[in-house]
Amino acid sequence: MWKKILFSRWTKAALFAACLIPAALLVWRGFQGDLTANPVEYIEHATGDWVIRFLLITLSVTPLRKIFNQPLLTRYRRMLGLFSFFYVCVHLLMYLIFDQMFDPSGIWADVLKRPYITVGTAGFLLMIPLAATSTAAMVRRLGPKRWQLLHRLVYFSTLAGIIHYYWLVKSDVREPLMYGAILTLLMLFRLRMWLRKEPKSVDARPLMAART
């Protein structure tokens, strides 16, 4: 039964629609005038949260596949990874357009002077090659080993996102600490896999894995 559900194109379509819900809610709240007194800041924070959430969900695919013995879960990892890139692009554009008005000198000054922006920018830059090489054609071009090594950048990108969030909030750090704890558990699971030298299939590709 689970194989039929996971292999269904309708399941994939439903997941795609579900991944759009955070963006749709922001649009809806915008039309309702319900984006708080500072809508730009609200959208920046909301999309930033969803970047980290989608990265963590994407990294959870391998543990879930192992625990429930459902290899078809890997069909959904590329979509989840690309949605994390979609939300980080929205997050960045809000900052560039409304906070900095595309002022290069102001942006560069922020990157240099504010550590949370420095690490956030680094996390975004690490995600670019992941999104750019998410297709099956890029796996063949780079070769599976080099492709897999490149996509391990997701660990550092996720960590950078969590640090960015932690340094941003300053006072109430419960949520970034929760995300950090989840990332730690996911990395411990992978460490256990590596130490046991479990055989790896194509599922071992960490983030925006292409379907082959």
Image: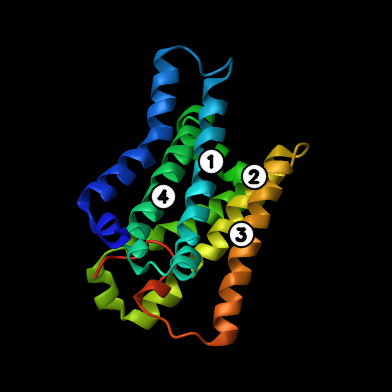
SS class, disc 4: helix
Residue at mark 3: 183
Q: Are marks 4 and 2 in contact (CB under 8 Å)?
A: no
Q: How crowded is the residue under tag 2: few (<14 C-alpha within 10 Å), some, or many (20+)? A: many
Image position, residue 200 (x, y; %):
42, 81
* Residue 16 seen anywhere in this rendered image of the structure: yes
SS class, disc 3: helix
Q: Is residue 152 left or right of residue 37?
A: left
Q: Nearer the viewer, residue 119 or 107?
A: 119
Q: Residue furthest right?
A: 171
The C terminus: image quadrant: bottom left
Residue at mark 2: 165
Q: Are marks 4 and 1 in contact (CB under 8 Å)?
A: no
Image position, residue 23 (x, y; %):
40, 32
Q: Which amino acid, mark 2? A: Tyr
Residue at mark 1: 48
Q: Is residue 19 above or below residue 135?
A: above
